[in-house]
């Protein structure tokens, strides 16, 4: 199947912004980070109605501080570590992706009006949030998760 490359642009607007005490991108130690996700003024507070019925949420965000020249189109050694294999950008979760999108499952702590508090969001203060979805068992994998050893090693300090 051939796809037409007609240079369609997709325009997205943030639905919220992240507020926390992590001002800079870091590779590890995200597990205890508590963040507020604050709705933009153009969305009604009711957008969060019913969200506290869920324990976990998926937060889709934009790595807005990754410069264009740092974007990886092909393959690289994860985190620049030559001991790990050369793998394509879509076989890793690095921030230097073509569309600079991040996706993390977080635990919901509470809602207060236009703000939700979550733990485990690996986004820095001021990060634009593009979407928020509740985690439902039926969307989680039904089979065993398989991954290479290098990714387990890479993630060993990520959520500490």
Image (tube, rainbow, N blue to C red):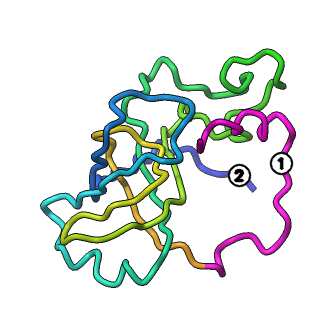
Please report contact status of discs 2 and 1: CB closer than 8 Å, yes or no. Answer: no
Residue 114 in the image: state x and y as whole percent.
20, 67
Residue 3 in the image: state x and y as whole percent.
64, 51
Residue occupied by mark 1: 147
**On screen, residue 7 above or below 73:** below
- Circle 2 sits in a helix, a strand or a loop, which is it? loop
**Is 96 placed left or right of 68 in the picture?**
right
Q: Nearer the viewer, residue 160 or 45?
A: 160
Task: Find residue 21 and report its image quarter.
Answer: top left
Residue 121 in the image: state x and y as whole percent.
46, 50
Q: Residue at x 33, y 61 (%)?
A: 117
Residue occupied by mark 2: 2
Q: Residue at x 54, y 59 (%)?
A: 105
**On screen, residue 119 above or below 23:** below
**Is 61 placed left or right of 16 in the picture?**
right
**Is 160 placed left or right of 107 in the picture?**
right
Q: Residue at x 44, y 47 (%)?
A: 8
User: The N terminus is located in which quarter?
Assistant: bottom right
Q: Which mark is residue 138?
A: none
Which is in the foreground here, disc 2 or disc 1? 1
Give the crowd class for mark 2: few <14, some 14-19, many >=20 residues within 10 Å.
Answer: few
The stretch of residues the image draws in magenta is: 137-160
Name which of mark 2 and mark 1 comes first in the sequence: 2
């Amino acid at each position: 199947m051939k796809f037409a490359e007609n240079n369609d642009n997709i325009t997205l607007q943030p639905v919220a912004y992240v507020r926390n005490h992590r001002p800079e991108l870091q590779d590890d130690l995200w597990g205890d980070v508590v963040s507020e996700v604050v709705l933009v003024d153009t969305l009604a507070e009711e957008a969060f109605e019913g969200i506290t019925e869920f324990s976990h949420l998926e937060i889709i965000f934009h790595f807005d501080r990754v410069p264009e020249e740092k974007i990886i189109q092909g393959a690289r050694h994860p985190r620049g570590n030559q001991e790990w294999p050369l793998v394509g950008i879509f076989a890793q979760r690095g921030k230097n992706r073509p569309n600079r999108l991040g996706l993390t499952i977080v635990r919901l702590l509470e809602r207060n009006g236009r703000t939700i508090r979550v733990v485990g969001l690996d986004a820095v203060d001021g990060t634009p949030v593009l979407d928020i979805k509740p985690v439902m068992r039926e969307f989680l994998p039904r089979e065993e998760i398989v991954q290479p050893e290098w990714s387990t090693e890479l993630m060993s300090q990520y959520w500490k």
